[in-house]
Amino acid sequence: MRDREEVTNKVSQFLEQIAGPDIQITPETNIAEELALDSVKVLDLLMELEDEFDVSVPLNLMADVQTVNDLVNLIEKTITDN
Amino acid sequence: MPLLDKFSSFLEERKQLLSVKPDIFGTKIEKMYSATEASIDGHKVLLAGTNNYLGLTFNKECLDAAHKAIDEEGTGTTGSRMANGNYSSHRELEKDLADLYHCNHCIVFSTGYQANLGTISGLAGTGDVLLIDAHCHASIYDGCKLSGAEIIRFRHNDPDDLSKRLNRLGDRAKSSLVIVEGIYSMLGDTAPLKEFVECKKQHNSYLMIDEAHSLGVLGDTGQGLVEVADVGKDVDFITGTFSKSLGSIGGYCASNHSQLDAIRYMSRPYIFTASPSPSNIASARAALVLLKEGKHLRENLWKQSNRLYAHLQNLGFKLGPEPGPVIAAQLETPEEALHIWTTLLKKGLYVNLIFPPASPQNMPLLRISISAAHDDKQMDFICNVFTELMNEK
């Protein structure tokens, strides 16, 4: 089982790779607006995270994800459900 | 945010692109001269971005069939297939398409978009799982969304990645549908279909292929990728469109599963729309005969496609992974793409310009589609225009 801190760190790490080191990632960061990620970039990021945690996250649930914290919650829940 | 405020920010962000003339997102075709020539912005141009793969839009047999249908059955059906819009010709076209694929069942929809929307949302529902290739068309994404099923995306053209995701589903894999395309609309590459078939068999899943860009282009009788890969019997559902190689409008799903007919009663995009007009169906039927017999059309299509792919490669363009009638030049920046597109148009060549996120890999694309109606002289022109473009850099 991966703990919440580990999931948060990994998500932040992946987002930093895309957004660049100059942008501060916090749990409240809005992924689409503040990091300027379009829908495809977000889906590609999700694929990387799925492989990292060996889970499949249904795309349907991504509609409710706005912040880094939302994404961490979704991945954590998927890991728990599996 | 007030309802209409999002349009202000959208228009502001795209100010530069939207100010370019002619409008890149709504190029106006003022006059059509033939399947490959038109007038845009007052100038005659050669068309190399129309998806008119077999060049049949002005074919005499197709025109005659459409004229006859209008005279005999009117301009439109004014109703749904479930009500007054179900003509003999719709059923006959369904039989023609079922025959093409050696299938027992086929449904005709009003557009190719609706064929995917209606098939996917009719087949899958809550509790089912849809696994889609990352490069699938928007109509597939939208069909998945409409279905209410779980949607899982796998890496483009990667059967191992699909297998990994099917493994994660465990026993639920048997209520899953895998969706791929014959030729992908943006980069023009083909799916490794045999491998996908093996994968779905191993996991007791189902497989659907969209042959929108491969119908008429691949296979001895033009079925598409299923014919080249010789897996027609192993693919559960085949969808496609009339709006590319058949030069009409409409779409279809063919299958050997008898349950396909049941989706007529539960597919909202089939039920709640008017059926295709008689002239669309008539020209599609005439074009389908020409498509089956069209080996000579495919020979020229592939000859011209291979020639342009090699030429652009020699000029240093970064292209999609394999030659074919869809040739995509991947460019670095939107500004570069826009400059090349407008320069080509000024030189008399129309191609498609695609920006992310509609194009994959976050790269703008110049998307060129070749037609069997392009002759050697026209291909000389296309090649020369690109050579000039590179020399002027």
Image: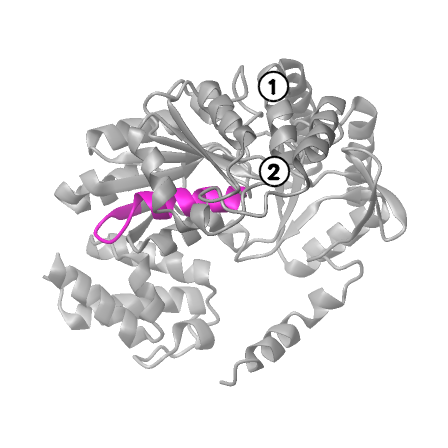
Q: Nearer the viewer, residue B124 or B14?
A: B124
Residue under label 2: B243
Residue B179's disc number: none
Membership of B113 in magenta stretch: yes
Q: Nearer the viewer, mark 1 or mark 2?
A: 1
Coordinates of residue B216 in the picture (x, y in percent): 57, 25
Q: Secondary structure at mark 2?
A: loop
Q: Is residue B100 left or right of residue B243?
A: left
Q: Secondary structure at mark 1?
A: helix
Membership of B378 in magenta stretch: no
Label 1 resides on the chain identified as B
Residue B289's disc number: 1
Label 2 resides on the chain identified as B
The residues tagged by marks 1 and 2 sit, at their Cα atoms, a distance apart of 15 Å
The secondary structure that most of the magenta stretch takes on is helix
Q: Is residue B288 left or right of residue B207?
A: right
Task: Give the quarter of the image for residue B304.
Answer: top right
Q: Which region of the structure is painted magenta?
A: B111-130
Question: What residue occupies the far left of the structure in this picture?
Answer: A1
The type of residue carrying mark 2 is Ser
Q: Nearer the viewer, residue B116 or B302?
A: B116
Residue that appears at 29% across and 37% down: B160
Q: Quadrant of the N terminus of chain A?
A: bottom left
Coordinates of residue A41 in the picture (x, y in percent): 44, 60
Q: Is residue B183 left or right of residue A45?
A: right
Residue that appears at 50% across and 37% down: B86
Can residue B373 be seen in this snapshot? no
Coordinates of residue B37 in the picture (x, y in percent): 81, 37
Above or below A9: residue B275: above
Q: Residues within 10 Å of mark 2 (few under 14, many from 20)?
A: many
